[in-house]
Amino acid sequence: MARPAGQSPGSWAPLLLLLVAGPAACTASPADEGAGPGGRGPRGRVRGDTGTDEAVPRHDSSYGTFAGEFYDLRYLSEEGYPFPTAPPVDPFAKIKVDDCGKTKGCFRYGKPGCNAETCDYFLSYRMIGADVEFELSADTDGWVAVGFSSDRKMGGDDVMACVHDDNGRVRIQHFYNVGQWAKEIQRNPARDEEGVFENNRVTCRFKRPVNVPRDETIVDLHLSWYYLFAWGPAIQGSITRHDIDSPPASERVVSIYKYEDIFMPSAAYQTFSSPFCLLLIVALTFYLLMGTP
């Protein structure tokens, strides 16, 4: 074979050596990068260093090794323990009845001396900035509600209800009474909602703006309204008819700017307090006394 003019035989020797050695000779080892006088080996150690550190293992390039190293880096702390999870949600703060009539208004319906955990029905309200905070609780596993009415009768009323659903949650919903039927309204003014179902009681707390845009289904709370109190069962998270035929209502219109602590005895404790029953007792006593020889 003729060689090109001007090229000596010795210039072919390096090319032949590369062909014999193969591609491995062209790839530098990561451990040898920077090697040489004063060069550094793995992890920056100076070559020739006589330290006793353990040899650094080479990383496997497999996907399993990569995933394991990523998990260690992402989910484990330096001590090898998992990072702490997010703290649990704060539990529902109990309703304080000592503030009734002082810093908030309250309505209690049930046994004399009952509180938010023992009354058949309990409601409180107080002003917080431009909002009114309501707290409701009732002896039921379904729903508890308050209605804002102009005439103490059901029909044409703005209603806020706390409903216990099948998943164990208590949701705040907005309704409008159409006759004896409560229609859910998608426009819900409630915010900062929280609720709990414990000890067979539905309890909730929410805020609602004092002033709202004019609407047939929602009232301005800066005006005074009769308050309607109701509670009852729920089926699959939907409210059904209230527990009693004639739910209690406030005797007069309520102003959110005036805090009172009003107690209303339930039917079981009204027997001897109504004027008719007192008159009947007096008549029977007189008859017995006059009829005795």
Image (cartoon, rainbow, N blue to C red):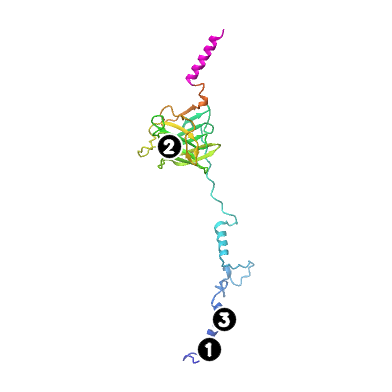
Contact (Cβ within 8 Å) of mark 2 with mark 1: no
Q: Is residue 184 above or below residue 57?
A: above
Residue 264, horizontal then vertical, whole percent: 48, 27
Q: Earlier in the sequence, mark 3 or mark 1?
A: 1
Residue 126, horizontal then vertical, whole percent: 44, 34
- Callout 1 amino acid: Gly
What's the magenta region? 274-293
Q: Secondary structure at mark 3?
A: helix
Label 2 crowding class (10 Å Cα cut-off): few <14, some 14-19, many 20+? many
Residue at image location 52% in from the left, 16% down from the top: 281
Residue 18, horizontal then vertical, whole percent: 54, 82
Residue ID for mark 2: 182
**Can the viewer see residue 98 in this picture?**
no
Can you tell which quarter of the image residue 215 is in?
A: top left
Residue ID for mark 3: 21
Q: Which mark is residue 10?
A: 1
